[in-house]
């Protein structure tokens, strides 16, 4: 198992520096492994992580867990929150971990020698016990983990736009196979010439 320092060094290398939210992410990932009884960073794909923001915390989580988008073990549901749900894909057990509402204030107290609030968070988040830094909640996913993960190699073709749809993400609408965009759920709109 990697140490916090090793994980933070990996995270900083991919992020080009170390920041407080990377520390939070790393601490969240390590705590999830401890709670779920999983050795991290994982060598397999047993842990699935659903993060609730993009950015710095995700780099820390990824460094601690070895979950990544490319390995299909990391999903982003952008709620704008530094929080994540960690799922043991074998047991279905899921825990949501987020910073304690007083984490910043506690970090300031844990690093009184820091030259700025940013530095206090950077140091304090490393020094605080997990029980003072993070909150853990057992949760149940709205969809079965098998549906989130899907099965490799499954493909469909959208009857409207013709694009390929991977991993059982197609929708059946009026007997037609549609991608989410053609079914009326696009995250974009086409620009007019």
Image (cartoon, grey):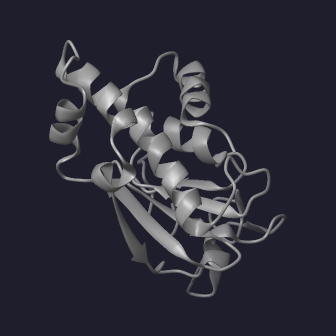
Tell me: residue 119, above or below residue 174: above
Residue 157, percent from left and from top: 74, 66
Front residue of 120/177: it is: 120
Tell me: residue 158, above or below residue 71: below
Residue 189, percent from left and from top: 41, 48
Q: Which residue appears farthest toward the right when viewing the image?
A: 153
Residue 96, percent from left and from top: 41, 65
- Looking at the image, can residue 181 be seen? yes
Q: How many marks?
A: 0
Residue 43 as seen in the image, left or right of residue 116: right
- Which residue appears at 30% of the width and 32% of the height? 124
Residue 82 as seen in the image, left or right of residue 146: left
Residue 54 as seen in the image, left or right of residue 106: right
- Looking at the image, can residue 159 be seen? no
Q: In which quarter of the image is residue 178?
A: bottom right
- Which residue appears at 42% of the width and 52% of the height? 187
| Quarter the C terminus occupies | top left
Q: Which residue appears farthest toward the bottom when viewing the image?
A: 175
Tell me: residue 46, above or below residue 9: below
Front residue of 102/82: it is: 102
- Which residue appears at 36% of the width and 47% of the height? 129
Q: Quadrant of residue 154?
A: bottom right
| Quarter the N terminus occupies | top right
Tell me: residue 181, above or below residue 133: below
- Which residue appears at 73% of the width and 50% of the height? 71
Front residue of 170/24: it is: 24
Residue 94, percent from left and from top: 51, 73
Q: Quadrant of residue 190?
A: top left
């Amino acid at each position: 198992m990697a140490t916090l320092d090793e994980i933070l060094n990996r995270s900083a290398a991919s992020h080009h520096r170390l920041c407080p939210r990377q520390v939070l992410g790393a601490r969240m990932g390590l705590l999830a492994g401890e709670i779920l009884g999983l050795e991290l960073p994982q060598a397999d794909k047993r842990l699935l992580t659903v993060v609730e923001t993009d950015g710095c915390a995700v780099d820390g989580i990824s460094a601690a867990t070895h979950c990544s988008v490319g390995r299909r073990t990391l999903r982003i549901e952008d709620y704008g929150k530094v929080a994540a749900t960690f799922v043991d894909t074998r047991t279905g057990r899921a825990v949501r971990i987020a910073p304690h509402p007083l984490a910043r204030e506690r970090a300031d107290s844990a690093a009184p020698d820091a030259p700025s609030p940013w530095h206090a968070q950077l140091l304090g988040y490393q020094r605080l016990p997990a029980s003072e830094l993070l909150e853990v909640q057992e949760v149940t996913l709205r969809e079965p983990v098998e549906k989130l993960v899907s099965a490799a190699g499954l493909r469909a073709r959208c009857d409207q736009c013709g694009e390929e749809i991977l991993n059982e993400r197609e929708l059946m609408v009026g007997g037609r196979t549609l991608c989410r965009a053609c079914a009326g759920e696009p995250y974009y709109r086409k620009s007019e010439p």
